[in-house]
Image (spheres, helix red, strand yellow):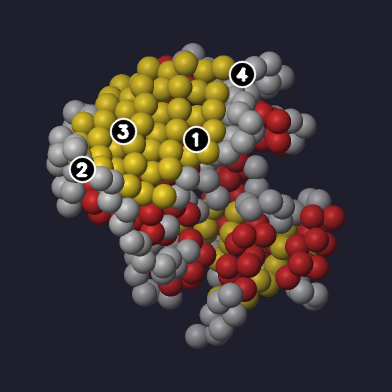
Amino acid sequence: MGKLRFGFIGTGGISQWHGRQLLELSGEAEIAALADPNADSRDKFIHKFGLDGVAVHDDYRDMLNECALDAVVICSPHTLHFEQATDALKAGCHVLVEKPMTCSSAEAERLIASAREAGKLLQVSYQRHFQPEFLYIRKALQDGAIGKLTSVTASLYQEWKQLTAGSWRAVPSLSGGGMLMDSGSHIVDVLLWTTNMTPVEVKPMLHRHGAPVEIDSFTAVRFAEGPIASLNVVGFAQGWHETYMFCGEEGAIRYDNGRIALLRLGKEPEYPELPARETNQDKSFVDAILGRHEVLVPGEFALKVVRLTEDIYKAAGYDPLAEID
C-alpha cells in the first residue's frame, strides 16, 4: 500500500510535535491536509514543515468531505474533541486524538462505540506510555519489585495560570476545565496506567486563584485494590516539576523530573539504566494502522482517565461547563 494520508484538525501548539514525528516516517505517512480556522496558524505549520501544496481548510468538515484521508490527528481545544473525532471516524478515518479524549465519560463511551461501529482505530496521545522511565515503573510494579503497593504520591507543578491567561485553556466552553483537565490529565494517566488500579473514592480540594477555571487541585484517592494515593496538580507555581513516589511493603520507586531511584530500607538508592525510547505516539499509531501491533493507548483506557477527572470535579461540586454564559 502507499503512504498513509494524514489530516490535521488544529495546527497550533502540540500539533508541531505530531507534525515532526509523522514526517520522520516519510516512507509510510504523509501530511495531506490541514484544517484550522486560524489561517496564520496554518501558514506557520506549512512553513515549518515545508508543506507547500498541502490542502488547507477553515472547517475540518470540508477537509473530511473533500480529501481522501486514512487518518486524522486532532489537536484542537478539549471540548471539540468528541464531535471532531466522531465525524472523522464516520468519514472512514482512523483517529489519534490529543488528551483529554473527551471532557465527559458519556462522550468517551459514545466515541469508543463510534470507533467500533466504524471499524477504525482510536488512539489517545498519552506520550508517557512510550517513555522508558514510565515503562520501567509499570513493569517494576507488575513484577512486584517493591512488594505489595501501599501508596502513591503523584505531583505536577507548572506556571499554568500565568501561561494560559487569555488563551482558550482559560475558557471553560473550550477547555472543559482547568489544569487538571489539561496538563493534569497526564498525571492522572500515569497514576492509573502504572498501577492498573481502580479508583473507588476521591476527596478533592480545588482553588481557582481568581481564574475562570480551577488552577490547583489536591485529591486523596482510594483504590479498590487497597492502596491510597494523593494526586496534586498545582497550576500556580513558579516553574515546572513532576514527581512520583510509589511505596510498597518491600521498597519504593521515586521519579523526580525524569530520574528514577529504587529505594530499599537501610540501603543506598539504586538508579536503573533505562533503554532508549523505542517509539512514540505517532509511530505507534502508524504501526497499529499497518497491523504491526494493537493500539497501545486505546479509548477504553483513556475513558478511565476521563472518569477519574470527572469524579474529582463532581466530588468538589465543580462543573466548568455549567458556568458558561
Q: Residues within 10 Å of mark 3 (few under 14, many from 20)?
A: many
Residue at mark 3: 152
Which one is in front, 15 or 32?
Answer: 15
Q: Is residue 45 above or below residue 254?
A: below
**Viewer-nearest of labels 3 and 4?**
3
Which residue sits at x=68%, y=21%? Answer: 211
Query: Residue 267 bears which disc, if any?
Result: 2
Disc ID at residue 208: 4
SS assignment at label 1? strand
Report x, y in % for residue 35.
72, 58
> In the rendered image, which residue does mark 1 sit on?
156
Q: Amino acid at mark 3?
A: Val
Quadrant of the rendered image containing residue 230: top left
Contact (CB < 8 A) between labels 2 and 3?
A: no
Above or below, 10 against 34 in this view is above
Element under disc 3: strand
Give the number of the disc on residue 118.
none
Query: What whole-number distance in Å separates the C-alpha atoms at marks 4 and 1?
Result: 16 Å
Q: Secondary structure at mark 4?
A: loop
Marks 4 & 2, CB-CB < 8 Å contact: no
